Amino acid sequence: MKQVGLTISGNRYNISLEDDFADFVYKDLEEAGVELFKDNKPDALLRAYLRLAKQATSYENEIELLIETLDSLS
């Protein structure tokens, strides 16, 4: 377990996550422009969330397309 911490509007939030997931979270937050060791405005976290939501939607669409393609082959 690793501690993941983030400061938003002067409040520090820490949570324990499985090691691999914590590494993913830190990497993704950094890529989204969220400062890991500085104070962040709430809109920075919202942008990071929306970035992940867009990725998830894209993955869902790709999975649906793959399912349709596989169904058409049978």
Image: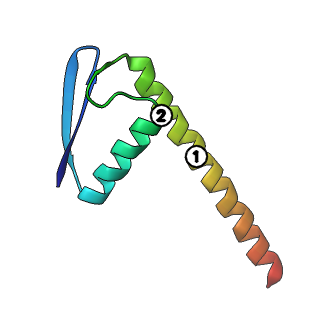
* Horizontal arrangement in the rendering, residue 10 relative to residue 51 (left or right): left
Query: In the figure, residue 70 lies in which quadrant?
Result: bottom right
Residue topped by disc 2? 32
Q: Residues within 10 Å of mark 1 (few under 14, many from 20)?
A: few
23 above or below 4?
Answer: below
Residue 28 x %, y % = 43, 43
Q: Amino acid at mark 1?
A: Gln
> Of the residues under marks 1 and 2, which one precedes in the sequence?
2
The quadrant in which the C terminus is found is bottom right
User: Is residue 14 rendered to the left or right of residue 73?
Assistant: left
Q: Residues within 10 Å of mark 2 (few under 14, many from 20)?
A: some
Q: Secondary structure at mark 1?
A: helix
Residue 55: assigned label: 1
Query: So how many labels did they put on this image?
Result: 2
Tell us which disc is closer to us: 1 or 2.
2
Give the quarter of the image for residue 51: top right
The picture places residue 5, in percent across and down from the top left corner, at: 22, 35
| Residue located 19% across and 25% down the image | 12
Q: Is residue 42 above or below residue 13?
A: above
